[in-house]
Image (cartoon, grey):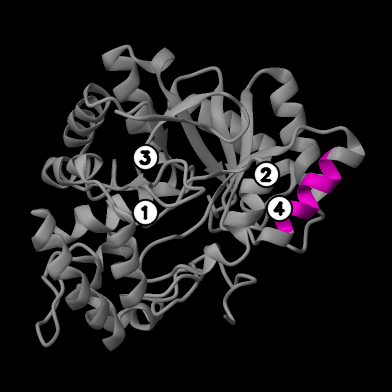
Amino acid sequence: MEYRSLGRTGVQVSALCLGCMMFGGKTSAEDSYAIIDRAIDAGINFLDTANVYSRGRSEEVVGEALRRNGKRHEIVLATKVHGRMSDDDPNAWGNSRRHIIEQCEASLRRLQTDYIDLYQIHRPQPSIPIDETLRALDDLVRSGKVRYIGTTTFAAWQIIEALWASKELNLNRFVSEQPPYNLLDRRIERELIPMAQTYGIAIIPWSPLAGGLLSGKYSRGTPPPADSRFANIQSNPILQRRMTERVYDVVEGLQPLAEEKGCTLSQLALAWCLRQPGVTSPIIGPRTMEQLEDNLRALDIAMSDEDRACIDEIIPPGRMISPFYEADFGPHPYRWL
């Protein structure tokens, strides 16, 4: 396993991060424990979850898995705050001090730990001043309940604003950003990655397989598999925007390169992402042990300059053909691009 610095912190994290969104939901607790154990055995020391995943159930499963295997001290454990945790309480979401402090305590209980290595703001919220959010996070760091803080799906300018506020107010700064990044949406190459490289921000891409669109399971003219994410596309406007005919153009263009390398399409897409400049650790989100094993094999795939040039011909740098800067949390500054 290759290890990389988490931004400028010096903390070493594995080149793949185990995303735990499925655990306790589509993936049973027992299967989740097995996947976590296998990932750790393979050298993964970076786990990412969120309070909103199955309304806390993912955190509970991750916490129990680490209690059972006794590996908590070896793991860089990341979770997030922002998403709605109650349908009745108007304050049960967002980036206010009230919600952040309350949910940090709840996450600590669910994760069965007394500290969180990386606590991330799950989405920006322009209606709340960034200093309100940063002061709450700074207090958590100073209390020892959180080691480092980061963001998820923030625009480059929002991170720069936060860095400026941290400097002006002498507060702990964000050390990481978790953006969507894959071969169908390369927009972060325009501004976000150059900014991150300049200011020492770790980039932890989510959805490197484009929600499964780059897994090889979808083909032109064939209905999506019944158990796949896009099987119920008609009821989900976000998925409808992502599943375009141009997706198939990319998939069909990449397939010969995958065959030449003797790997699956998903392994090629993941290998490309983890070897892109500025990327720290792409997040894999296996639902099954089989998917985890497929993802792990991407670590052995080399990407040459010729490979990158070939891929750039299929989907040019900075371009997007399937929008991932849209989410259930509401509009994002990049939604118009």
Q: Which mark is residue 322?
A: none
| Left or right for 164, reference 152 | right
Q: Is residue 230 magenta?
A: no
Looking at the rendered structure, the kind of residue marked 3 is Ser
Q: Position of residue 254 (x, y in %)?
A: 21, 70
Viewer-proximal residue, 258 or 204? Answer: 258
- Measure the alpha-carbon separation of dots 4 and 2: 21 Å
Q: Residue furthest front?
A: 306
- Measure the alpha-carbon separation of dots 2 and 1: 33 Å
Q: Provide the residue span drawn in magenta.
A: 158-166
Q: Residue at x 81, y 37 (%)?
A: 135
Q: Where is the N terminus found, in terms of image quarters?
A: top left
Q: Which residue is mark 1?
A: 273
Q: Is residue 81 something one can see in this rendering? A: yes
Q: Residues within 10 Å of mark 1 (few under 14, many from 20)?
A: many
Mark 1, mark 3: which one is toward the viewer?
Answer: 1
Tell me if residue 307 comes above or below residue 187 in the rendering: above
Q: Position of residue 189 (x, y in %)?
A: 53, 63
- Measure the alpha-carbon separation of dots 2 and 3: 19 Å
Q: Which residue is mark 2?
A: 99
Looking at the rendered structure, the kind of residue marked 4 is Ile
Looking at the rendered structure, the kind of residue marked 2 is His
Q: Main secondary structure of the magenta part?
A: helix
